[in-house]
Image (tube, grey):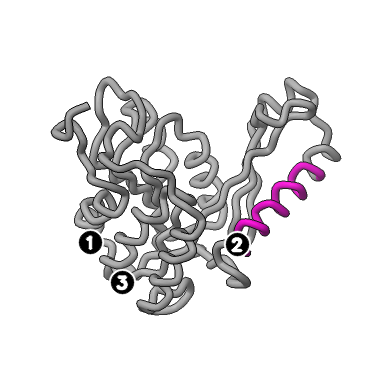
Amino acid sequence: MPDSQYRFRDRRDAGRLLAAHLLHFADSKPLVLALPRGGVPVAYEIAKALHAPLDLLIVRKLGAPGHSEFGIGAVVDGAHPEIVLNEEIVRQLDVSQNYLREETVRQLAEIDRRRRLYRSDRLPPDPTGRTVIVVDDGIATGGTVRAGLRALRKVRPKRLVLAVPVAAPDTASRLRDECDELVCLLTPEPFYAVGAHYLNFDQTSDDEVVGLLAQADAMGSVAGTTP
């Protein structure tokens, strides 16, 4: 693919371009939440531009009994972790409450492991009553983002914003109903893959995530504090 067909040089470039469309949120002292790992470099540039705290939104799929790759819902990290279930599938598979509890405990343990890896002992921020900007590097099917937005809605943020550089058109349309505002720079038709719209779409490493979060903290962008 020729370079001229790429929209973004890399995730940091995408974040800077996206931040320019989010500056009107600066006065509301928003909380920026990134989906790791690819969303973190994008979100870092947004948090930097808005002088906002940066943290993570970690989402784990709840797998069906005997078929862990088939999702029946998700559990979402936060000050008050939330469970989002596909009630229709849960009923169709006759999933027991005992299984749901056990699977939730397993995924919460994995969320805790990942948060400790990325954020050490820092507790997740409470989004209640705040403007929250959820950021990823792009969206294809949107399942993980949808679960995250629905979980955040349960804890009553003042305003819930989804910000992404690129998304599949149909997915973007569906996600508008899951948030108060969707800011998306590119909805290409036809849509092939998120990475097709980046010149550099190398995998974001754990070390890069940790480093960017530390830089955000050093700038005063510590979740839960006033910038």
Which amino acid type corresponds to the residue marked 3 in the rendered image?
His
- Number of numbered labels in the structure image: 3
Q: Of the residues shown, which amino acid type is indicated by label 2? A: Leu
Q: Residues within 10 Å of mark 3 (few under 14, many from 20)?
A: many
Query: Which corner quadrant holds the N terminus?
Result: top left
Q: Sequence order check: which comes first, mark 2 or mark 1?
A: 1
The reply, left or right, for residue 189 in relation to residue 148 is left
- Quarter the C terminus occupies: bottom left
Crowding at dot 2, Cα within 10 Å, few <14 / some 14-19 / many 20+, comes out as some
Percent coordinates x, y for residue 164 in the rendering? 33, 45
**Helix, strand or loop at mark 3:** loop
**Pair 2/1: label in front:** 2
Q: Relative to 183, does residue 12 appear above or below in the rendering?
A: below
Looking at the image, which residue is at 35% across and 69% down? 52
Name the element at disc 1: helix
Helix, strand or loop: magenta stretch: helix
Write the start and end of the magenta stretch as one range.
102-116
Q: CA distance from mark 2 to mark 1?
A: 31 Å
Of labels 3 and 1, the one closer to you:
3
Residue 212 falls within the magenta-colored stretch:
no
Residue 191, compared with residue 25, is above or below; it is above
Mark number displayed over residue 51 = 3
Identify the disc placed on residue 117.
2
Q: What residue occupies the far left of the structure in this picture?
A: 4
Disc 1 crowd, CA 10 A, few/some/many (<14, 14-19, 20+): few
Q: Residue at x 17, y 29 (%)?
A: 2
**What residue is disc 1 on?**
23
Give the residue drawn at x 74%, y 46%.
Answer: 104
The answer to which image quadrant residue 213 occupies is bottom left
